[in-house]
Image (cartoon, rainbow, N blue to C red):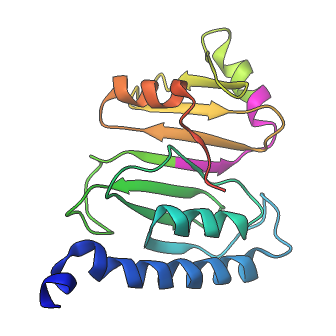
Amino acid sequence: MRRLFRDRRVRIGGPVVLAAFVVAAAWVLLSRGSSSTSPVSPIEPVALSASGLATLTHGVRQPIYWAGPRNNYLYELRRTSDGTVYVRYLPPGVDVGAKGAKYLVIATYPFKHAYEALQNVAGGRGVRVPGGGLALVDAKDPKSVHLAFPGVDFQAEVFDPSPKRALEIASSGQVHSAG
């Protein structure tokens, strides 16, 4: 029995599931009646499983983009008062709140007419992605790639310490709403 509770997945699994339901309930209550331009209550970083992230996404009125599940990873979710949501991929042994920019992060930003705006900025330099989206490498920081999809008033951003990997993930079709 002691061995079972020493297993990181078991120690974290129960609290992660509970935290997912608490965050989902709070988010639903706090987001009622809010629009993508209205301030929302921020959510401090919380660890979620892939199923917890999907559950949370079903309860909110916006997409939460991510790059799909990774074996044995935790997903750190954080929301700012402007409605931006960050999903950070934490490999085994890394705890929520770990410092440093050495992990994959998928951000979701409220952004009216995001696709059209990204097309205008891209000026033909964007990369078409599965699902009809458009990806554009950030000229100031190639570790960040911006994504937008037609008819969606949110923009996604893929950040990875490797610019090559950031572009690969963004252009592969892996990035989609968690719900």
- Seen at 29% across and 79% down, the residue is 10
Whether residue 116 is situated above or below residue 36 in the rendered picture: above
Horizontal relation, residue 100 to residue 129: left or right: left
Closer to us: 100 or 50: 50
Horizontal relation, residue 19 to residue 131: left or right: left
Closer to us: 133 or 139: 133
- Seen at 49% across and 26% down, the residue is 138
Whether residue 58 is situated above or below residue 4 in the rendered picture: above
Residue 168 picture quarter = top left
Q: Residue furthest front?
A: 1
- Seen at 33% across and 69% down, the residue is 96
Residue 144 picture quarter = top left
The picture places residue 90, in percent across and down from the top left corner, at 32, 57
Q: Number of callouts in the render?
A: 0
Horizontal relation, residue 48 to residue 58: left or right: left
Q: Residue furthest left?
A: 3
Horizontal relation, residue 7 to residue 105: left or right: left
Closer to us: 89 or 18: 18
The reply to whether residue 53 is visible in this rendering is yes
Q: Quadrant of the C terminus?
A: bottom right
Whether residue 53 is situated above or below residue 7 in the rendered picture: above
Q: Quadrant of the N terminus?
A: bottom left
The picture places residue 173, in percent across and down from the top left corner, at 57, 30
The reply to whether residue 79 is visible in this rendering is no
**Magenta extent:** 107-116
The picture places residue 13, in percent across and down from the top left corner, at 37, 77
Residue 110 in magenta stretch: yes
The picture places residue 139, in percent across and down from the top left corner, at 48, 22
Q: Residue furthest bottom?
A: 1
